[in-house]
Every structure is written in C-alpha cells, then in structure tokens.
Amino acid sequence: QVQLVESGGGLVQAGGSLRLSCATSRSIFNFINMGWYRQAPGNQREWVAAIVFGGSTNYADSVKGRFTISRDNAKNTVYLQMNSLKPEDTAVYYCHARRNSGSVPYDYWGQGTQVTVSS
C-alpha cells in the first residue's frame, strides 16, 4: 500500500513563503511522476506542479516563477517551495503520485494540507 503524507501547510501573509513536503512509503523511483494539486472551496481540484521520473519539472501558469518543486531521493520526499504567496493560492494542497503497472496507471493521493494566505 502506497502512502503519501503531506506536511508544511499553514497560515501566511501575502508575499510570504511556505514549503510543503510529501513523504512516500515507497521509493520515489517507483513513480513515473509526482506532483501537487490544490483545491479551493467551491472549485475543482487543479494541477499545480509536477516532477517526472527523469527530474524534469512543470508548473501551472498561475504559479510559474513563484513555486518550485523538487525531490530528495534519499528521503523519498517531494517538496513544493512556495514564494510570493497570494491570497488566491489559498487552498488544500494534495500530493499526487502515479505509477504504471504494465499499461495500467495507478494514482495515489495524500490527505491534503491547508494553505491559507491572508491579504
């Protein structure tokens, strides 16, 4: 059973920073990609950032230049460094991981961590 455990959320003022962590119960190299999604009240869950097996990263336009996704292979942990936070970044942030078994994809989610940015 794969577990993803997030931490690092909290309350911060606009312009501040937070770093989210996502620790996995398996080696990061079991996954073809890992990333972060977020969901604000009344909104659908949206993709934020991803890091693929080879280490390349991708970001949603809304966070590009402000957020950085990274990983520590030895700790089996993925991070999301969030700088220059805005009130519209307020959401529950979810860690996501995908692995393939043959041609069948399996998606895993963390329990979510709340990020609140005050104006």
Image (cartoon, rainbow, N blue to C red):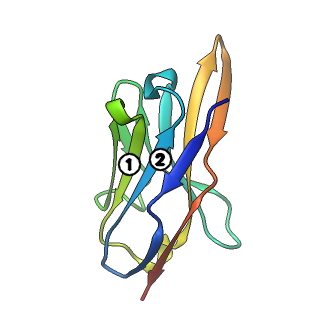
Residue with the mark numbered 1: 79
User: Eyeballing the image, is 9 above or below 86?
Assistant: above
Residue at 52% from the left image edge and 28% from the top image edge: 26
Give the quadrant of the N terminus.
top right
Identify the amino acid type marked 2. Answer: Cys
Residue farthest to the top? 102
Give the quadrant of the C terminus.
bottom left
Q: CA distance from mark 2 to mark 1?
A: 6 Å
On the image, the x and y values in percent for residue 94 come to 57, 53
User: Eyeballing the image, is 87 above or below 38?
Assistant: below
Q: Which mark is residue 36?
A: none
Residue with the mark numbered 2: 22
Identify the amino acid type marked 1. Answer: Tyr
**Could you classify mark 1 by the number of other residues whose Cα lies within 10 Å: few (under 14), some (14-19), or many (20 or more)?**
many
Residue at 51% from the left image edge and 22% from the top image edge: 30
Residue 56 seen in render: no
Q: Earlier in the sequence, mark 2 or mark 1?
A: 2
Residue 114 placement: quadrant = bottom right
Residue at 31% from the left image edge and 76% from the top image edge: 16
**Front in this rendered view, residue 87 or 97:** 97
Residue at 37% from the left image edge and 36% from the top image edge: 75
**Front in this rendered view, residue 86 or 80:** 80
On the image, the x and y values in percent for residue 86 come to 40, 76
Residue farthest to the bottom? 119
On the image, the x and y values in percent for residue 46 come to 59, 56
